[in-house]
Image (spheres, helix red, strand yellow):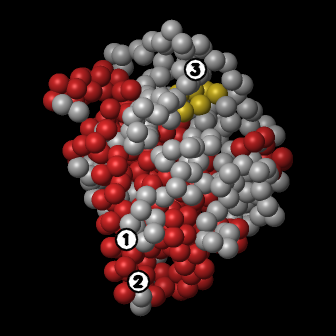
Protein backbone atom coordinates (compact mmCIF):
# COMPACT_ATOMS: atom_id res chain seq x y z
CA UNK A 1 0.00 0.00 0.00
CA UNK A 2 1.43 3.38 -1.01
CA UNK A 3 1.29 6.57 0.97
CA UNK A 4 -1.80 7.74 -0.83
CA UNK A 5 -3.72 4.53 -0.09
CA UNK A 6 -2.52 4.53 3.49
CA UNK A 7 -3.72 8.08 3.94
CA UNK A 8 -7.13 7.13 2.57
CA UNK A 9 -7.30 4.27 5.05
CA UNK A 10 -6.43 6.60 7.91
CA UNK A 11 -9.09 9.12 6.88
CA UNK A 12 -11.75 6.44 6.50
CA UNK A 13 -10.98 4.93 9.89
CA UNK A 14 -11.01 8.35 11.51
CA UNK A 15 -14.47 8.96 10.07
CA UNK A 16 -15.65 5.61 11.41
CA UNK A 17 -14.22 6.50 14.81
CA UNK A 18 -16.05 9.80 14.91
CA UNK A 19 -19.33 8.35 13.77
CA UNK A 20 -19.33 10.56 10.67
CA UNK A 21 -19.26 7.70 8.23
CA UNK A 22 -22.30 5.60 7.48
CA UNK A 23 -21.34 2.71 5.26
CA UNK A 24 -24.06 2.35 2.63
CA UNK A 25 -24.89 -1.06 1.20
CA UNK A 26 -23.46 -1.80 -2.20
CA UNK A 27 -26.04 -2.67 -4.87
CA UNK A 28 -25.48 -6.35 -4.18
CA UNK A 29 -26.05 -5.97 -0.44
CA UNK A 30 -29.56 -6.75 0.68
CA UNK A 31 -30.57 -5.92 4.23
CA UNK A 32 -30.88 -9.32 5.89
CA UNK A 33 -33.18 -10.16 8.73
CA UNK A 34 -31.63 -13.16 10.51
CA UNK A 35 -33.46 -14.07 13.67
CA UNK A 36 -32.00 -13.09 17.02
CA UNK A 37 -32.00 -16.13 19.24
CA UNK A 38 -33.52 -15.62 22.66
CA UNK A 39 -31.54 -16.36 25.78
CA UNK A 40 -34.60 -17.82 27.49
CA UNK A 41 -33.97 -21.50 26.86
CA UNK A 42 -30.45 -22.16 25.68
CA UNK A 43 -29.09 -23.00 29.14
CA UNK A 44 -31.68 -25.74 29.53
CA UNK A 45 -30.88 -27.12 26.08
CA UNK A 46 -27.19 -27.39 26.96
CA UNK A 47 -27.82 -28.57 30.50
CA UNK A 48 -26.22 -25.43 31.95
CA UNK A 49 -27.37 -24.48 35.42
CA UNK A 50 -28.90 -21.03 35.76
CA UNK A 51 -26.86 -19.10 38.30
CA UNK A 52 -28.09 -16.48 40.70
CA UNK A 53 -26.84 -12.88 40.66
CA UNK A 54 -25.05 -13.59 43.94
CA UNK A 55 -23.27 -16.61 42.44
CA UNK A 56 -22.30 -14.59 39.38
CA UNK A 57 -20.91 -11.79 41.54
CA UNK A 58 -18.90 -14.24 43.64
CA UNK A 59 -17.45 -15.91 40.53
CA UNK A 60 -16.43 -12.58 39.04
CA UNK A 61 -14.93 -11.47 42.35
CA UNK A 62 -12.79 -14.61 42.43
CA UNK A 63 -10.95 -13.28 39.38
CA UNK A 64 -10.50 -9.93 37.70
CA UNK A 65 -12.73 -7.89 35.41
CA UNK A 66 -10.70 -6.01 32.78
CA UNK A 67 -11.90 -2.46 32.34
CA UNK A 68 -13.41 -2.33 35.85
CA UNK A 69 -14.57 1.17 36.64
CA UNK A 70 -14.57 2.18 32.99
CA UNK A 71 -17.12 2.35 30.19
CA UNK A 72 -16.61 -1.26 29.12
CA UNK A 73 -17.08 -2.87 32.53
CA UNK A 74 -20.69 -3.96 31.80
CA UNK A 75 -19.57 -5.36 28.42
CA UNK A 76 -16.72 -7.36 29.97
CA UNK A 77 -18.71 -8.56 32.98
CA UNK A 78 -21.41 -10.01 30.74
CA UNK A 79 -18.82 -11.48 28.39
CA UNK A 80 -17.11 -13.26 31.28
CA UNK A 81 -20.38 -14.62 32.61
CA UNK A 82 -21.22 -15.87 29.14
CA UNK A 83 -17.86 -17.64 28.91
CA UNK A 84 -18.59 -19.27 32.23
CA UNK A 85 -21.95 -20.47 30.98
CA UNK A 86 -20.59 -21.71 27.66
CA UNK A 87 -17.91 -23.82 29.37
CA UNK A 88 -19.30 -27.18 30.46
CA UNK A 89 -18.12 -29.11 33.51
CA UNK A 90 -16.01 -31.38 31.29
CA UNK A 91 -14.23 -28.38 29.76
CA UNK A 92 -16.12 -28.39 26.46
CA UNK A 93 -16.66 -24.85 25.24
CA UNK A 94 -19.70 -24.40 23.07
CA UNK A 95 -19.34 -21.79 20.34
CA UNK A 96 -22.85 -20.49 20.96
CA UNK A 97 -26.01 -21.37 22.81
CA UNK A 98 -28.19 -23.39 20.44
CA UNK A 99 -28.65 -25.23 17.18
CA UNK A 100 -25.57 -25.63 14.96
CA UNK A 101 -23.47 -23.45 17.27
CA UNK A 102 -23.88 -25.76 20.27
CA UNK A 103 -20.70 -27.69 19.50
CA UNK A 104 -17.06 -27.32 20.48
CA UNK A 105 -14.52 -25.88 18.03
CA UNK A 106 -10.82 -26.08 19.02
CA UNK A 107 -10.38 -22.49 17.82
CA UNK A 108 -13.11 -21.10 20.05
CA UNK A 109 -11.99 -23.26 22.96
CA UNK A 110 -8.48 -21.86 22.67
CA UNK A 111 -9.61 -18.24 22.87
CA UNK A 112 -11.99 -18.95 25.75
CA UNK A 113 -9.29 -20.79 27.70
CA UNK A 114 -6.91 -17.86 27.29
CA UNK A 115 -9.56 -15.33 28.38
CA UNK A 116 -10.56 -17.36 31.44
CA UNK A 117 -6.93 -17.81 32.46
CA UNK A 118 -6.09 -14.15 31.97
CA UNK A 119 -8.91 -13.18 34.33
CA UNK A 120 -7.99 -15.59 37.11
CA UNK A 121 -10.29 -18.51 36.32
CA UNK A 122 -7.52 -21.03 35.81
CA UNK A 123 -9.48 -24.12 36.75
CA UNK A 124 -11.96 -23.60 33.93
CA UNK A 125 -9.19 -22.61 31.53
CA UNK A 126 -7.27 -25.79 32.24
CA UNK A 127 -10.44 -27.89 31.91
CA UNK A 128 -10.95 -26.43 28.43
CA UNK A 129 -7.42 -27.51 27.51
CA UNK A 130 -8.04 -30.92 29.08
CA UNK A 131 -11.03 -31.36 26.80
CA UNK A 132 -8.90 -30.59 23.76
CA UNK A 133 -6.37 -33.16 24.95
CA UNK A 134 -9.13 -35.72 25.35
CA UNK A 135 -10.49 -35.30 21.83
CA UNK A 136 -7.14 -34.83 20.08
CA UNK A 137 -6.61 -37.23 17.19
CA UNK A 138 -3.77 -39.71 16.93
CA UNK A 139 -1.77 -37.50 14.59
CA UNK A 140 -2.01 -34.61 17.06
CA UNK A 141 -4.55 -32.62 15.06
CA UNK A 142 -8.26 -32.03 15.51
CA UNK A 143 -11.59 -32.37 13.85
CA UNK A 144 -13.40 -29.18 12.87
CA UNK A 145 -15.77 -29.46 15.85
CA UNK A 146 -16.98 -31.90 18.49
CA UNK A 147 -20.07 -32.89 20.41
CA UNK A 148 -20.11 -31.37 23.87
CA UNK A 149 -19.75 -34.76 25.57
CA UNK A 150 -16.59 -35.45 23.57
CA UNK A 151 -18.00 -38.64 22.06
CA UNK A 152 -17.44 -37.64 18.46
CA UNK A 153 -18.36 -35.12 15.80
CA UNK A 154 -21.81 -33.91 14.73
CA UNK A 155 -21.16 -34.42 11.03
CA UNK A 156 -18.59 -35.36 8.44
CA UNK A 157 -17.18 -31.94 7.67
CA UNK A 158 -13.49 -31.78 6.83
CA UNK A 159 -10.86 -31.35 9.51
CA UNK A 160 -9.32 -27.92 10.07
CA UNK A 161 -5.53 -27.84 10.34
CA UNK A 162 -5.47 -24.62 12.34
CA UNK A 163 -6.78 -26.45 15.44
CA UNK A 164 -3.33 -27.74 16.41
CA UNK A 165 -1.90 -24.25 16.14
CA UNK A 166 -4.64 -22.73 18.26
CA UNK A 167 -4.28 -25.45 20.91
CA UNK A 168 -0.55 -24.75 21.21
CA UNK A 169 -1.05 -20.98 21.29
CA UNK A 170 -3.64 -21.31 24.06
CA UNK A 171 -1.45 -23.70 26.03
CA UNK A 172 1.41 -21.23 25.89
CA UNK A 173 -0.77 -18.29 26.95
CA UNK A 174 -2.46 -20.13 29.80
CA UNK A 175 0.80 -21.47 31.23
CA UNK A 176 2.37 -18.02 31.03
CA UNK A 177 -0.29 -16.91 33.54
CA UNK A 178 0.79 -19.50 36.12
CA UNK A 179 1.86 -17.79 39.35
CA UNK A 180 5.08 -19.80 39.62
CA UNK A 181 7.36 -21.72 37.31
CA UNK A 182 6.80 -24.84 39.41
CA UNK A 183 3.05 -24.63 38.88
CA UNK A 184 3.51 -24.03 35.17
CA UNK A 185 5.69 -27.13 34.97
CA UNK A 186 3.15 -29.25 36.82
CA UNK A 187 0.33 -28.08 34.56
CA UNK A 188 2.42 -28.64 31.45
CA UNK A 189 3.29 -32.16 32.54
CA UNK A 190 -0.43 -32.89 32.91
CA UNK A 191 -1.02 -31.56 29.40
CA UNK A 192 2.15 -32.90 27.83
CA UNK A 193 0.18 -35.09 25.45
CA UNK A 194 -1.58 -32.05 24.03
CA UNK A 195 1.75 -30.27 23.59
CA UNK A 196 3.54 -33.23 22.05
CA UNK A 197 0.75 -34.23 19.69
CA UNK A 198 -0.09 -30.75 18.41
CA UNK A 199 3.59 -29.94 17.96
CA UNK A 200 4.10 -33.11 15.97
CA UNK A 201 1.11 -32.25 13.79
CA UNK A 202 2.36 -28.71 13.10
CA UNK A 203 5.85 -29.91 12.30
CA UNK A 204 4.64 -32.66 9.98
CA UNK A 205 2.15 -30.34 8.28
CA UNK A 206 5.01 -27.94 7.44
CA UNK A 207 7.86 -30.46 7.04
CA UNK A 208 9.66 -28.91 10.00
CA UNK A 209 8.87 -25.42 8.77
CA UNK A 210 10.37 -25.94 5.31
CA UNK A 211 7.05 -26.09 3.45
CA UNK A 212 3.71 -24.35 3.62
CA UNK A 213 0.88 -26.65 4.74
CA UNK A 214 -1.70 -28.15 2.43
CA UNK A 215 -4.97 -26.26 1.91
CA UNK A 216 -7.47 -26.72 4.71
CA UNK A 217 -10.76 -25.18 5.85
CA UNK A 218 -10.21 -22.37 8.36
CA UNK A 219 -12.45 -20.03 10.34
CA UNK A 220 -14.53 -19.31 7.22
CA UNK A 221 -15.88 -22.85 7.74
CA UNK A 222 -15.86 -23.91 4.12
CA UNK A 223 -13.88 -26.26 1.88
CA UNK A 224 -10.73 -24.73 0.45
CA UNK A 225 -8.80 -25.75 -2.65
CA UNK A 226 -6.15 -23.06 -2.06
CA UNK A 227 -4.03 -22.39 1.01
CA UNK A 228 -5.30 -19.55 3.19
CA UNK A 229 -3.48 -17.20 5.52
CA UNK A 230 -5.98 -18.36 8.14
CA UNK A 231 -4.38 -21.80 8.12
CA UNK A 232 -0.70 -20.86 7.96
CA UNK A 233 -0.68 -18.12 10.60
CA UNK A 234 -2.18 -20.19 13.48
CA UNK A 235 0.29 -23.02 12.80
CA UNK A 236 3.11 -20.49 12.95
CA UNK A 237 1.77 -19.12 16.25
CA UNK A 238 1.56 -22.70 17.55
CA UNK A 239 5.16 -23.49 16.68
CA UNK A 240 6.32 -20.32 18.44
CA UNK A 241 4.31 -21.24 21.53
CA UNK A 242 5.66 -24.79 21.59
CA UNK A 243 9.23 -23.49 21.30
CA UNK A 244 8.64 -21.29 24.37
CA UNK A 245 7.21 -24.19 26.37
CA UNK A 246 9.90 -26.78 25.68
CA UNK A 247 12.52 -25.35 28.11
CA UNK A 248 10.05 -25.87 30.98
CA UNK A 249 10.44 -29.59 30.32
CA UNK A 250 14.20 -29.29 29.93
CA UNK A 251 13.90 -29.83 26.16
CA UNK A 252 16.26 -27.10 25.01
CA UNK A 253 17.30 -28.84 21.80
CA UNK A 254 13.62 -29.27 20.88
CA UNK A 255 13.05 -25.57 21.58
CA UNK A 256 15.87 -24.62 19.21
CA UNK A 257 14.51 -26.93 16.51
CA UNK A 258 11.01 -25.52 16.84
CA UNK A 259 12.22 -21.94 16.81
CA UNK A 260 14.20 -22.63 13.65
CA UNK A 261 11.13 -24.26 12.08
CA UNK A 262 9.00 -21.25 13.01
CA UNK A 263 11.56 -18.83 11.56
CA UNK A 264 11.60 -20.83 8.33
CA UNK A 265 7.81 -21.04 8.11
CA UNK A 266 7.49 -17.33 8.80
CA UNK A 267 9.89 -16.61 5.97
CA UNK A 268 7.85 -18.78 3.61
CA UNK A 269 4.65 -17.07 4.72
CA UNK A 270 6.04 -13.63 3.91
CA UNK A 271 7.49 -14.82 0.59
CA UNK A 272 4.15 -16.30 -0.46
CA UNK A 273 1.63 -13.81 0.91
CA UNK A 274 3.68 -10.61 1.12
CA UNK A 275 3.95 -9.70 -2.58
CA UNK A 276 0.17 -9.36 -2.96
CA UNK A 277 -0.42 -7.55 0.32
CA UNK A 278 -1.25 -10.46 2.67
CA UNK A 279 -4.52 -11.37 1.05
CA UNK A 280 -6.59 -14.35 2.12
CA UNK A 281 -5.01 -16.37 -0.68
CA UNK A 282 -1.48 -15.94 -1.97
CA UNK A 283 -2.91 -16.01 -5.48
CA UNK A 284 -4.82 -12.72 -5.90
CA UNK A 285 -6.87 -14.24 -8.69
CA UNK A 286 -8.67 -16.73 -6.45
CA UNK A 287 -12.37 -15.90 -6.21
CA UNK A 288 -13.53 -14.35 -2.88
CA UNK A 289 -9.97 -13.40 -2.09
CA UNK A 290 -8.88 -9.98 -0.92
CA UNK A 291 -7.56 -9.14 2.49
CA UNK A 292 -9.35 -10.79 5.41
CA UNK A 293 -9.33 -10.91 9.18
CA UNK A 294 -6.61 -13.59 9.26
CA UNK A 295 -4.05 -10.81 8.82
CA UNK A 296 -4.69 -10.07 12.51
CA UNK A 297 -3.10 -13.44 13.31
CA UNK A 298 0.24 -11.91 12.28
CA UNK A 299 0.03 -9.35 15.11
CA UNK A 300 0.37 -9.79 18.87
CA UNK A 301 -0.87 -11.62 20.89
CA UNK A 302 -0.38 -14.29 18.21
CA UNK A 303 3.05 -13.07 17.13
CA UNK A 304 5.97 -12.20 19.43
CA UNK A 305 6.33 -8.67 18.11
CA UNK A 306 4.57 -5.97 16.11
CA UNK A 307 5.03 -6.93 12.45
CA UNK A 308 6.34 -5.02 9.47
CA UNK A 309 4.73 -1.93 8.00
CA UNK A 310 3.44 -4.05 5.11
CA UNK A 311 1.50 -6.32 7.44
CA UNK A 312 0.13 -3.33 9.36
CA UNK A 313 -0.96 -1.75 6.08
CA UNK A 314 -2.88 -4.93 5.25
CA UNK A 315 -4.40 -4.92 8.74
CA UNK A 316 -5.60 -1.35 8.20
CA UNK A 317 -6.83 -2.10 4.68
CA UNK A 318 -8.95 -4.97 5.93
CA UNK A 319 -10.78 -2.62 8.28
CA UNK A 320 -11.81 -0.46 5.32
CA UNK A 321 -12.36 -3.03 2.59
CA UNK A 322 -14.43 -5.37 4.79
CA UNK A 323 -16.58 -2.58 6.27
CA UNK A 324 -20.30 -3.32 6.24
CA UNK A 325 -23.41 -1.09 6.41
CA UNK A 326 -23.85 -1.21 10.19
CA UNK A 327 -20.23 -0.18 10.67
CA UNK A 328 -18.80 -3.58 11.54
CA UNK A 329 -16.70 -5.97 9.48
CA UNK A 330 -17.23 -9.03 7.32
CA UNK A 331 -14.77 -11.94 7.69
CA UNK A 332 -13.00 -10.66 4.60
CA UNK A 333 -13.13 -8.15 1.80
CA UNK A 334 -14.20 -10.97 -0.50
CA UNK A 335 -17.00 -12.19 1.76
CA UNK A 336 -20.49 -12.24 0.28
CA UNK A 337 -22.24 -8.88 0.11
CA UNK A 338 -25.22 -9.60 2.34
CA UNK A 339 -24.88 -6.53 4.54
CA UNK A 340 -23.99 -8.48 7.70
CA UNK A 341 -21.27 -7.48 10.17
CA UNK A 342 -19.59 -10.31 12.08
CA UNK A 343 -18.61 -9.67 15.68
CA UNK A 344 -15.84 -12.32 15.98
CA UNK A 345 -13.80 -10.50 13.36
CA UNK A 346 -14.46 -7.07 14.88
CA UNK A 347 -13.39 -8.36 18.31
CA UNK A 348 -10.33 -10.04 16.80
CA UNK A 349 -9.23 -6.74 15.26
CA UNK A 350 -9.79 -4.99 18.60
CA UNK A 351 -7.63 -7.62 20.33
CA UNK A 352 -4.78 -7.41 17.81
CA UNK A 353 -4.86 -3.61 17.86
CA UNK A 354 -4.90 -3.43 21.65
CA UNK A 355 -2.03 -5.92 21.88
CA UNK A 356 0.05 -4.00 19.33
CA UNK A 357 -0.06 -0.54 20.87
CA UNK A 358 -2.88 0.68 18.62
CA UNK A 359 -5.17 1.76 21.43
CA UNK A 360 -7.20 4.23 19.38
CA UNK A 361 -8.08 1.54 16.87
CA UNK A 362 -9.01 -0.94 19.61
CA UNK A 363 -11.21 1.62 21.37
CA UNK A 364 -13.11 2.31 18.16
CA UNK A 365 -14.09 -1.33 17.67
CA UNK A 366 -14.82 -2.03 21.32
CA UNK A 367 -17.20 0.91 21.36
CA UNK A 368 -18.92 -0.49 18.28
CA UNK A 369 -19.29 -3.90 19.89
CA UNK A 370 -20.65 -2.39 23.11
CA UNK A 371 -23.27 -0.55 21.08
CA UNK A 372 -24.45 -3.66 19.22
CA UNK A 373 -25.17 -6.19 21.93
CA UNK A 374 -28.28 -8.29 22.37
CA UNK A 375 -30.98 -6.73 24.57
CA UNK A 376 -29.79 -8.66 27.63
CA UNK A 377 -26.15 -7.58 27.11
CA UNK A 378 -24.52 -10.57 25.41
CA UNK A 379 -22.48 -10.26 22.25
CA UNK A 380 -24.17 -11.79 19.19
CA UNK A 381 -22.44 -13.44 16.27
CA UNK A 382 -23.78 -11.00 13.70
CA UNK A 383 -25.18 -7.51 13.33
CA UNK A 384 -27.68 -6.91 10.54
CA UNK A 385 -27.27 -4.08 8.04
CA UNK A 386 -29.77 -1.99 9.98
CA UNK A 387 -27.63 -2.27 13.12
CA UNK A 388 -29.79 -4.77 14.97
CA UNK A 389 -28.09 -7.72 16.72
CA UNK A 390 -28.65 -10.99 14.88
CA UNK A 391 -27.78 -14.66 15.07
CA UNK A 392 -26.90 -16.51 18.27
CA UNK A 393 -25.97 -14.68 21.44
CA UNK A 394 -23.75 -15.14 23.32
CA UNK A 395 -20.91 -16.15 21.02
CA UNK A 396 -17.85 -17.47 22.84
CA UNK A 397 -15.14 -16.41 20.38
CA UNK A 398 -16.37 -12.83 20.36
CA UNK A 399 -16.77 -12.67 24.13
CA UNK A 400 -13.28 -14.09 24.74
CA UNK A 401 -11.63 -11.68 22.31
CA UNK A 402 -13.39 -8.71 23.91
CA UNK A 403 -12.23 -9.73 27.40
CA UNK A 404 -8.67 -10.09 26.13
CA UNK A 405 -8.77 -6.83 24.18
CA UNK A 406 -9.89 -4.78 27.17
CA UNK A 407 -7.29 -6.58 29.29
CA UNK A 408 -4.60 -5.66 26.76
CA UNK A 409 -5.66 -2.01 26.94
CA UNK A 410 -5.52 -2.15 30.73
CA UNK A 411 -1.98 -3.52 30.51
CA UNK A 412 -1.01 -0.70 28.18
CA UNK A 413 -1.08 1.86 30.97
CA UNK A 414 -1.82 5.57 30.53
CA UNK A 415 -1.14 5.49 26.78
CA UNK A 416 -4.03 3.08 26.31
CA UNK A 417 -6.44 4.82 28.65
CA UNK A 418 -9.49 6.54 27.23
Asked if residue 417 can be seen in this view, the reply is no
Graded by Cα atoms within 10 Å as few (under 14), some (14 to 19) or many (20 or more), the crowding at tag 3 reads: some
Q: Residue at x 64, y 27 (%)?
A: 390
Q: Which of marks 3 and 1 is in front?
A: 1
> Quick one: quadrant of the N terminus?
top left
Residue 339 image offset from top left, x and y in percent:
55, 20
| Mark nearer the N terminus (2 vs 1) | 2
The residue singled out by tag 2 in the image is 254
Image height check: is 414 above or below 62?
Answer: above
The residue singled out by tag 3 in the image is 338
Question: Between marks 2 and 3, how big is the CA–CA gap?
Answer: 47 Å
Is residue 407 rendered to the left or right of residue 386?
left
Residue 173 image offset from top left, x and y in percent:
45, 66
Image height check: is 388 above or below 318?
Answer: above
Question: Between marks 3 and 1, how big is the CA–CA gap?
Answer: 40 Å
Q: Which residue is drawn at 53% across and 40% down?
A: 344
354, 210: nearer the viewer: 210
Graded by Cα atoms within 10 Å as few (under 14), some (14 to 19) or many (20 or more), the crowding at tag 2 reads: some
Is residue 52 rendered to the left or right of residue 343?
right
Amino acid sequence: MGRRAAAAVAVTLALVAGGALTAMPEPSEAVPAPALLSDASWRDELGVAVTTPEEDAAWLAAGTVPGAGGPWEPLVRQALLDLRSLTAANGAVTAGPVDRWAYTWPRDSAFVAVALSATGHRDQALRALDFLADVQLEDGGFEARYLVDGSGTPDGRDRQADGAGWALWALGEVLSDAPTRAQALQELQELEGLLTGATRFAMEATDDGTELPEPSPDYWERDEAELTLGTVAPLLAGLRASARLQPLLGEHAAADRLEAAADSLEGLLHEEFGPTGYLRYADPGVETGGVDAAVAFLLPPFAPRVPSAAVLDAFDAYQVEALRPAGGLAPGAGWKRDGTSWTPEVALVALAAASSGRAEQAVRWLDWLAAHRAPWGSLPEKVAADGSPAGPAPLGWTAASVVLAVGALDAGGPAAAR
